[in-house]
Amino acid sequence: QVQLVESGGGLVQAGGSLRLSCAASGRTFGNYAMGWFRQAPGKEREFVAAISWSGSSTYYADSVKGRFTISRDNAKTTVYLQMNSLKPEDTAVYYCGAIRRARASIDERDYDYWGQGTQVTVSS
C-alpha cells in the first residue's frame, strides 16, 4: 500500500514557475514508477509526465515538453514536477500516481495509487 500526498500548487502569473512535490509513504517507493496527470474543469484527466523507478527514463506530454521536468528522490520517497514558463492552459488539478513496476506509463489506467491532487492556477 502506498499513500501519496501532493503539495506545491498555487496561483502564479503566466511565465512563472512552480514546483510540485508528491510525498509517498512506505519503504518500497523505489519499486514504483511514478507519474503526474492533470485535470482541468470540464475536461478529462490527461497525462503530463512520468518517470521510471530508477529515474533513468522520463516521458512528457508534448504540451509540456521543454517546460516541465519530472524527477524523483528515492531516499526522500518524493517525486517532483518542476514547471517553468507556465501558461493559463496549464491551469488544472495536478495528481501524482504510482505503478507497482519499474517502467513508467502515460496511461492512467496502469496506475495503482493516486494522490488527492493539488490546484495549479495560472493567470494571464
Image: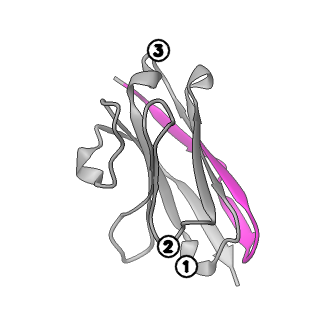
Question: Which amino acid type corresponds to the residue marked 3 in the rendered image?
Answer: Arg
Bounds of the magenta span?
A: 2-21
Q: Nearer the viewer, residue 95 or 34?
A: 34
- Residue type of the residue flagged with mark 1: Glu
Secondary structure, magenta segment, majority class: strand
The residue that appears at 36% across and 64% down in the rendered structure is 45
* Residue, far front: 56
Q: Helix or strand or loop: what does disc 2 sit on?
A: loop
User: Mark 3 falls on what kind of element?
Assistant: loop
Disc nearer the start of the sequence (3/1): 3
- Which residue is label 2 attached to? 63
Mark 3 vs 2: CB contact within 8 A: no
Q: Position of residue 12 (x, y in %)?
A: 73, 69
Name the mark nearer the viewer: 2 or 1.
Answer: 2
Real-space Cα distance between discs 2 and 1? 10 Å
Q: Is residue 100 left or right of residue 66?
A: left
Mark 3 and mark 1: Cα distance apart in space: 36 Å
| Residue drawn at the location 49% of the way across and 73% of the way down | 63
Asked if the residues shown at circle 2 and circle 1 are in contact, with their CB atoms under 8 angstroms apart, the answer is yes
Work out whether mark 2 precedes mark 1 in sequence or the reverse, and give the earlier one: 2
Q: Which residue is mark 3?
A: 27
Please determine whether, in this image, residue 47 is positioned above or below residue 90. Answer: above
> Which residue is depicted at the point 45% across and 71% down?
40
Instruction: Read off the residue under disc 1.
Output: 89
Q: Residue 95: x percent and y percent?
A: 46, 51
